[in-house]
Amino acid sequence: MEAGRGALIFSFALSVSFLLLASSASAQLSTDFYKNTCPNVESLVRSAVTQKFQQTFITAQATVRLFFHDCFVRGCDASVIIASPNNNAEKDHPDDLSLPGDGFDTVIRAKAAVDSDPNCRNKVSCADILALATRDAIVITGGPSYAVELGRRDGRISSKASVQHSLPQPFFNLDQLNTIFSKHGLSQTDMIALSGAHTLGVSHCSKFSKRIYGFNSTHRIDPTLNFQYAMQLRQMCPLNVDPRVAIPMDASTFHIFDNAYFKNLQQGKGLFISDQVLYTDPRSRPTVDLFASSETAFRDAFVSAITRLGRVGVLTGSMGEIRIDCSRPN
């Protein structure tokens, strides 16, 4: 009994130590981290993101999604950008294969822009560049501007195995969503607000085809899905559709960062089960209704949530490194 109690205390102590370390690391982030080493870092990144966005609008959603996938696996350390010669990095996992190349390219271009300034060369982490580029992508599509906390260091490790069971899935229910977000200190409100980034998203047909062709033994179409919307999706995603075809996740304003995503949920037009459940589950519906009725409430909640997301598992101080090439450890 005493041995078991001792193990329990030891396990609890380890958990507390881990939380304290994580809290300590995020406390070292600051919005003026580069004021003496690279004071124009934000304008350099913003210029690169703007230039990339002018070439292809997919830049915005690709960059935001890359940031989310990075932070949910090993923390916000730019490990998702690392390439592996034997295809064993995070980006090689099936859950990351659909990450658009434009997101990676945005970070690489922004890194080159920052390093073109002799004062900044090899002083700004890829993780911070991704965080800044994400904010700029949101702003350029009409979303809220916010101060980005900086001071992250880059991780040296990226493995395909670490992605397994680390990312939310399109078929998740509310409990599953809350569980995976709470592991990173994010609340249900944070989760719903961050889901609002799907206003910029696109998805391949395979991610939701079961909802429109073979939901279950009694319903071919998911009954929580707006029927007319389901018919539109069938037209865009016929059986045996080209797997590269991508469908906007926001049926009305997919190129604008706004609260239309939540209004769509009220009409049964959430593309994923994990989208629509935010409205069908009575525990989360009031928040969806609030964000649908108040753009300000959504924007404020989103800024708060993405700031907290940016603190997840960060490396600071002497931990990690400043990668010279974002796609490989030094």
Image (tube, helix red, strand yellow):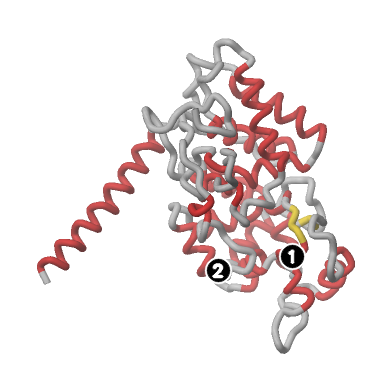
Front one among 230 and 146: 230
**Residue at horizontal 79 percent and vertical 73 percent from the top:** 226
User: In the figure, 123 relative to 315: above or below?
Assistant: above
- Expressed as whole percent of the image width and height from the top left, the position of residue 136 reads 66, 34
Left-right relation of 258 to 302: right
Which mark is on residue 90?
none
User: In the figure, 263 relative to 313: above or below?
Assistant: below
- Expressed as whole percent of the image width and height from the top left, the position of residue 106 reads 69, 33
Outermost residue toward the bottom? 218
- Expressed as whole percent of the image width and height from the top left, the position of residue 274 reads 63, 66
- Expressed as whole percent of the image width and height from the top left, the position of residue 165 reads 51, 61
Outermost residue toward the top? 118
**Residue at horizontal 12 percent and vertical 72 percent from the top:** 1
Which mark is on residue 206?
1
**Residue at horizontal 64 percent and vertical 15 percent from the top:** 116
Q: Secondary structure at mark 1?
A: helix
What whole-number distance in Å separates the C-alpha atoms at marks 2 and 1?
21 Å
The answer to whether residue 61 shows anywhere in this view is: no
Outermost residue toward the right? 235
Q: Nearer the viewer, mark 2 or mark 1?
A: 1
Residue type indicated by callout 2: Leu
Residue 210 lies in what quarter of the image? bottom right
Left-right relation of 222 to 274: right
Which mark is on residue 174?
2
Q: Earlier in the sequence, mark 2 or mark 1?
A: 2
The answer to whether residue 12 shows anywhere in this view is: yes
Q: Secondary structure at mark 2?
A: helix
User: In the figure, 76 relative to 34: above or below?
Assistant: below
Q: Dot 1, how many residues are within 10 Å of its Cα: few (below 14), some (14-19), or many (20+)?
A: some
**Residue at horizontal 79 percent and vertical 77 percent from the top:** 213
